Amino acid sequence: MSGPAAGTAHAATTTDVVCLGESMVTFLPSQPGRLADVPSFGRGIGGAESNVACALAAAGHRAAWVGRVGADGFGDHLVETIAGYGVDTSAVRRDPDRPTGIYFRTATDRGTGAHEVAYYRAGSAASAMSPANVPYGELFAGRILHLSGITAALSADCLALLRELTAPRPGRPLVSFDVNHRPRLWRDGDAGVLLELARRCDLVFVGEDEAEEAWGIVGAEAIRAALPEPSVVVVKRGSAGATVFASGLGPAPRSPNAGGPAPAAGGAEDGSGPRSTDVGAAEAVQGAPRSAGGDTVTVVPALRVDVVAAVGAGDAFAAGFLSATLRGLPVRDRVRHGHLMAAAVLTVPGDLTEPPARDHADRLAALDDGAWGRLRLGPGWTAADRAHEEVRTP
């Protein structure tokens, strides 16, 4: 099979979001310190796209993860764990000749010089994904197809696959793309290809820092100028929040049964920056759209969060944003739901956690600007609310 035929239309969807990418078994340290000094590790899972799928499923959406793992115990663990979140893993392929990727990391935040990550993913089963061996029917069966730039860095075949999946064609779902620039993966490649891929998508998440590092582009307005095609560009600005450029509805996700397209929107939370992030004074007016060059521009401040570990927050934000998009919420609230989902992950050690209850998140997202600016979230905030809900519920 050489790829989907141009013009192929898909029947009524049964999935909200399909996520494609590599997931790996991750080993989390039992204590802080250098990898050389850590005596033992706990096993978890990690992978940008599967993180998004797990968070969406935990939030009550129909999510699927498509990937490739080895015919080994680590592959078994990945598939079983991801499925345990309620994610459809039926389209995951097993590779009898290549292993499942694994990695080890320290407990130190990614943004510090003491942070270490040791990847063992070269030649992994996922790196063998190509236009010839992925299940296109499953990939295009959802309302949204979510991809990331990490996949493009794994191999030439993986890059060819992303070029195939982002190619314009009638009937394709809304294509969401998180740039997810990882410099270590691009040591021998040209990260400029991520700009090419992003321009072929409908919704793009990109950090100001990664746009400068990967493309030499500085500032939100310049990023939008370099990405004129996507209907929505979400520029993540760390502790300053996010700037969202939206030019129109675009090919918005449709319900499997009926209903018109949901409005386009965006938001950001990358989990980088200081251990407690503050709302910037310049962003005092939240979610107040303005027009610029045909775009509606919306600025939404970040939350103040007492960070435990800044790993997986960007994936959680994307999940919160996509969740709110599927629900047809306003732009500001989609951004806020992204921040809240990210805050849930920022306040735990691993990549995944139970998201806030939907009604709790809705109440927080509906706060007035002053109350949102005063909000501060720390470890246990989602569990505390769930306990409160249990007490209140007869």
Image (cartoon, grey):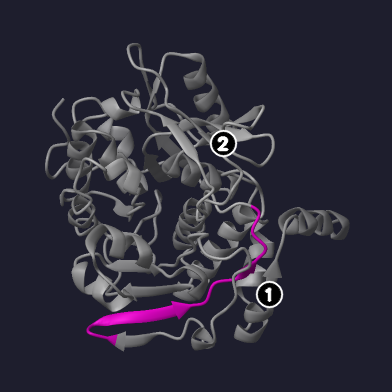
- Horizontal relation, residue 366 to residue 384: left or right: left
Q: Is mark 2 on a helix, strand or loop?
A: loop
Q: In the depicted view, which residue is nearer to us: 210 or 261? A: 210
Q: Report which residue position mark 1 lands on.
A: 375
Q: Give the range drawn in magenta.
A: 292-308
Q: Identify which amino acid the numbered label 2 is placed on.
A: Gly
**Quadrant (top left/top right/bottom left/bottom right) for the N terminus:** top left
Q: How crowded is mark 2: few (under 14 residues within 10 Å), some or many (20 or more)?
A: many
Is residue 34 visible in the rendered image? The answer is yes
Q: Is 293 one of the magenta-colored residues?
A: yes
Write down the quadrant of residue 308 in the picture.
Answer: bottom right
Q: CA–CA distance between discs 1 and 2?
A: 31 Å
Q: Report which residue position mark 2 lands on.
A: 86
Q: Are marks 1 and 2 in contact (CB under 8 Å)?
A: no
Write down the quadrant of residue 67 in the picture.
Answer: top left
Q: In the depicted view, which residue is nearer to us: 139 or 205? A: 205
Q: Is mark 1 on a helix, strand or loop?
A: loop
